[in-house]
Image (cartoon, grey):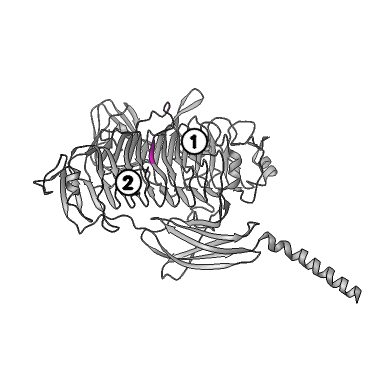
Amino acid sequence: MIMMCYVARIFGILLFLACGPCVMAGNPVIPGNLESYSTIHSIGFEWDITGDDNHNATCSLQYKVAGAATYISFKSMYRVDFEGYNMLAGSILFLDPGTTYDVRLTMVDPDGGNSTQNIQVTTRAVPRMPTNGQTYHVISGNGGGTGSAADPFQGVDAAEAFVVAGDVCLLHAGNYGNTVRFNTGGTENNPIVWKAAGDGDPVFEGVRVEASYVWFEGIRVIDQQYGMRTSPPAPKDIVVTRCNFYNNHYGIYLNDGGEGWYIADNVIVGDNIPKTSNFSGEGIELWYTDGHTVAHNTISRVADGISYPGKNVDMFGNDIFDTSDDGIEFDYGHANNRAWGNRITNLFNNGISFQPMNGAPYYVLFNQVSVLNGQSVLKLRTRSDRALIAHNTFIINSGPMASGSEFLNNFEIKNNLWISIQDRYAWENGATTSSNWKTDFDYDGFDWGNYTYAFKWSNVRLNTIADFTAQTGQEVHGIEIDYDVCFEHLNYTSSGNAVDSFHIEYNTLVPNCDAVDAGIVITGINENHMGSHPDLGAYEVGKSLPMYGVRSTCTNISVNTWMGPAVGFWHADATNWSLGHIPTSCDQVVIGTGNHIQVASGETAEGYSIDIATGATFETQGDATIILIAGTLP
């Protein structure tokens, strides 16, 4: 009896020791609150959890248009254990606007706690101008008028005394004065619209947005420290489209908050001199606010092109160039910020900044980034967490990742090109570091020129990609490429051994480059590739090229006279054109005597009426497409 009791006690103790730590560690996942939100083209999710201390829980994403029969898979969400967040989070991108989707989220943990959620989420619609309100006419002035064409309101204040939700105010040419305040708002489906009448620029020396549901189209804001600012209470659902911001230190600045803005097809030319100005003065400063779409803007001569998204912000199709600091600045952002399909050229500091991250994940996809004599294509200084860095073409004068590379260890990095024009490490990391449960690097292409070492990692110099793989276990399928033979177009003006200026063009690959068909499929991201596998970098050989910057409408006919240097490129700084913007289709373009304008290969100039004066030349390069409505080519 004593022996039996002793054995029973030992068995009980062993059972406690075996099972007790499993419970204490909290490895089974326990699902909590699921939050979802959307933009025009994306849906984001944050699914809070407890447990899963070993970080092996996953969550797959499937979606379909509501009522459709078949689900489509998208890349799985990311496990986030960072800065107080304990969750699975992620996005579905490239969705249709104004569409309701059925989404299935399936959480799986080998340690237990599996869960499935089926929800419906509707993407935001592209803003539509109201059609049921009144149309009023407005001129500059200090009061009076009835708003008719014959007796327009004199000044914005006079109009705001009458307008209601759904009304359209046509702003006629003139200077409307200093810091005009818009404090009458519309409703969600019926904004109040302030639109250029079409007889010349309505000019504002500063704009303050103090109400929600207001639409600005075609205005010109000039010569201010802050071009457009906000005032409490944090105006939401503002549309800023086809406007021109010229010679302002900050173009658009959401200093007092805002949510759900649509900022698209604007030209923003700041007051910075890229080579010599400091790091202040942004093109679009979102100031940690949420839910915006920032698309197809042409931004130059600022410090940072687009800065400080809060969470759930989409930035795509923007053409950002000639900046004194960074192209896109994610700094201090939270979950589900996304930058895809942007062209970012001639940056004097860094390409895309993550300094620091306050949440995760971020998505950085299909961007072309060309940095001059600054620091790195990605700015990493302090804390970082989950991000998908995929299909980007990263080019820099010397060393794509010159500092902060240890923070890459928290990223998933796939199918990118990392190009150093001068002979230098592809990635340089002098800090002691090692891979972790988040690290996932593979299928990238690198060019370090004739430098002795491909990488400096954890302060160890490594001659080849194979050496990097041996040390880290990463980039098993990474390849070396030679930019001199791989790119159809990678042109720059040099000053000594340094790149003085990259040409604003498409850095496309030749079909026989080793980077073609060298990538891996990423679910929902690149399955529409042309060859046997996806190509590396921002462009797929054989696919049509994306449009960057302001999109054409063919509705406003205007004359754009070349005012830039005698020898220039079509997509040069917007200040080179008389109207302060790069001409859009259906405009008339005048190229004066003594000028030589070149349309770079891969660009398209369709539907222009082009007048080429005697003594001027207009040259096409490679496969540039020129379709003329009027005029003749020399």
Sort mark 1 into few (<14), some (14-19) or many (20+) by Cα contacts within 10 Å: many
Q: In the rendered structure, which amino acid carries the disc numbered 1?
A: Asn
Residue 141 is a magenta residue: no
Q: Nearer the viewer, residue 114 or 315?
A: 114
Residue at 55%, 57% (x, y): give it.
Answer: 87
Q: Position of residue 507 (x, y in %)?
A: 46, 40
Can I make out residue 304 in this image?
yes
The residue singled out by tag 1 in the image is: 350
Report helix, strand or loop for mark 1.
Answer: strand
Residue under label 2, please give it: 551
Is residue 493 positioned above or below 31 on the image?
above
Residue found 49% across the figure and 68% down from its top: 118
User: Which of pointers 2 and 1 indicates the residue nearer the eye?
Assistant: 1
Q: Which residues are magenta?
A: 275-284
Relative to 130, residue 469 above or below: above
- The spot of residue 6 in percent (x, y) is 88, 71
- Label located before the other in sequence (2 or 1): 1
Find the distance from the CA under tag 2 to the CA under tag 1.
26 Å
> In the rendered structure, does residue 282 fall within the stretch colored magenta?
yes
What kind of residue is marked 2? Arg
- Quadrant including the C terminus: top left
